[in-house]
Amino acid sequence: VIAQCALGVDIGGTKMLAGVVDRDGQVARREERATPQESQEVFLKELDSLVEGLLDDDVAALGFGLPSTIDQRAGRTVGSVHIPLADFDFRDRMSERFRLPVAIDNDGNVTAIAEWKLGAGRGASHIVALTLGTGIGGGLILDGKPYRGSIGAGAELGHIVLDYDGVPCGGACTGRGHFEALAAGSAADGAAEQRFGSGATSRQLVEAARAGDEGAAEDLAEIGRRLGAGIASFVNIFNPELVILGGGFAHAEDLILDSARETLALEALPPGRDLVRIVRAEFGREAGMIGAALVAFEAFDAGAS
Ligand SMILES: [Zn+2]
């Protein structure tokens, strides 16, 4: 039996995007809803309704990309920074309710899988994928397969420590000076507020820099240097062929990438430093949804064989 379509659901802190996807990544139909934040009960009710609205006989499996740390042994979400979903038997709950094979994975991992199988990482075996949004999502492809650590809770690349005892990280993370607090949208929001006052955003900072504001440009260059420092650590550890950058904040690449490359050149060791290529993600906001469908196909195929 070959599954024709899977339903992939990308769950973020503000929206849930679901789509019926075939094995080539073509999306037959899609739907987006706001992510309820009131409680786990309300969140699950809305998610059930989103899935039910898209299910039909073509859908052979379900995949969920979650902004959560996951224990793949039990199919449990252990904790979530941006959604009301704590310690929960997510995979069993969904397979019992919908009577289909279910895969769950971290949102950074499914994004990396989509780019590796169908996007900017096609043909590569060693990839570091970074999604630059408010925070930084990360995923690793190593030796030609996704790397998730010992129980599936990796790879939280956004939470490497760049500045020990530095600024607090966001949400439920108790760490300080983490990569995602220093090198993505929330850092640009902070710089914007310092420069333009309370309520200013990274978007204003980017627009000001493009309009010739040298201070705003320097703020973004500094964020780029931090980004380059983090990438250099990944290059030193993993010797990837590709670093794939996606996410909304990656649109500021004209303002951050030159300084990121300068720092990378200083901090990363040859020959990895000279071999790695930094490329733009091919999938935009649908990367997580498509990757979630791809892991759903894996769950289906594992059950069928
Ligand atoms: Zn953190």
Image (cartoon, helix red, strand yellow):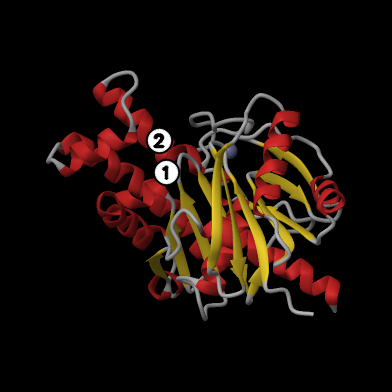
Report whether 273 appears left or right of 11.
left
x, y (%) of residue 137?
Answer: 54, 49
Report whether 270 appears left or right of 124.
left
Residue 113, by quadrant, is bottom right
Which mark, by number, is residue 224?
none
Q: Give the farthest residue toward the left.
A: 212
To which residue does mark 1 refer?
Answer: 183
| Front-most of residues 80 and 10 | 10
| Mark 2: secondary structure | helix
Report whether 304 appears left or right of 270.
right
Residue 67 visible: yes
Label 1 Cα neighbours within 10 Å, binned few <14 / some 14-19 / many ≥20: many
Q: Is residue 244 above or below residue 218?
A: below
To which residue does mark 2 refer?
Answer: 187
| Distance CA(mark 1)–CA(mark 2) | 6 Å
x, y (%) of residue 239?
Answer: 52, 70
Amino acid type indicated by mark 2: Ala
Asked if the residue at tag 2 contacts the one at tag 1, i.e. Cβ–Cβ closer than 8 Å, the answer is yes
| Mark 1: secondary structure | loop
Which residue is painted at 52% across and 73% down in the image?
118
Q: Is residue 24 above or below residue 104?
A: below
x, y (%) of residue 296?
Answer: 71, 64
x, y (%) of residue 59?
Answer: 71, 64
Report whether 130 appears left or right of 11.
left
